[in-house]
Image (tube, rainbow, N blue to C red):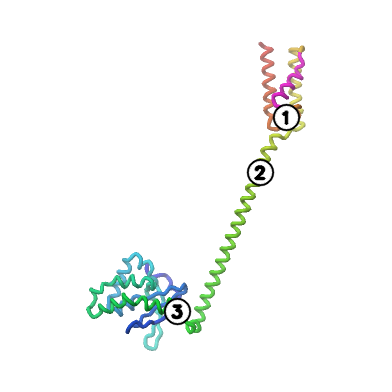
Amino acid sequence: MLEKDSALMVVEQKEVVFYDDGIVAVRVADGTVYVPIRPICSLLGIDWAGQRRRINRDAVLSEVMRSVDVTSTEGTRIVTRRMLCLPLEYLNGFLFGINADRVKSELKEQVIRYQRECYKVLADAFIDSPVSDDWMQSNPEAIAALQQIRENALAVANLAEEQIRMMRRLDKAAIVIGQYGKRITALEQKLAPREAITDEQAADISAKVMAIATEMTELDPSKNHYQSIFRELHRRFRVTSYKNIRQGQYQAVLDFLDTWADAAWRDEVE
């Protein structure tokens, strides 16, 4: 859609004399200069409805067309109308779309003059000159609104900068915490398997060895089965005492003793 829900805020309006024509243009809050197109069509004697359809068909012009409130004097009344405008930098895109050979012969030279010079005259009047002091003094509400927009923009920019700084600090903290977490996990992995079994677990192993040795001694009293089992236990799990067996080895020790007992029983049966 070309027409927007709300018109852009006008901060300056000028009527620029171009040869014998008065061309109205406005500057909005963001500094963009807009030119109402319908009055130019009237000055050039071309059909506005047809030109509007042409703009609507143009991919670029239709995208940049905006509704802007333009003030005019009608007799003793000051009237504000919402008009369709093109940004000044796109004015030539519209003007050069007019075929000077297809307008009335008495208007051909005027169309060419617009195509050749109109943009420069308007640019000299707006782009190279700041907003006038008279306009600023006579439009305090608009100036206040612009100042509020500026303050809001600065506040948003400051907030964004602070957010960026905070995110950078959090990223650095996350990296440090992650590194410490990896170190702690590695340390835990190193320490946990080396933690010695509890006294209760050591007592379980001793009792299991004693039970196996006692049973084997009944079957073969010629050997000290108690020492044999402990000697193999120390050799297999690389400890000087069964109390030094590590937590990670506890279940393996119990499985080993069960296997020893089963083997001894099978040998006796055979």
What's the distance in space between the residues labelled 3 and 1, CA to CA?
A: 90 Å
Which quadrant of the view contains residue 228?
Answer: top right
Q: Which residues are magenta?
A: 223-238
Assign the C terminus to one quadrant of the image: top right
Callout 2, which amino acid? Arg
As displayed, is residue 248 above or below residue 186?
above
Residue at numbered disc 2: 183
Assign the N terminus to one quadrant of the image: bottom left
Residue 120 is inside the magenta segment: no
Q: Residue furthest top?
A: 270
Residue at numbered disc 3: 129
Residue at numbered disc 1: 245
User: Which badge, 2 or 3, is on the more N-terminal residue?
Assistant: 3
What's the distance in space between the residues labelled 2 and 1, CA to CA?
A: 26 Å
Q: Residues within 10 Å of mark 3 (few under 14, many from 20)?
A: few
Q: Are marks 2 and 3 in contact (CB under 8 Å)?
A: no
Which quadrant of the view contains residue 206?
Answer: top right
In-front residue for pair 59/216: 59
Magenta region, main secondary structure: helix
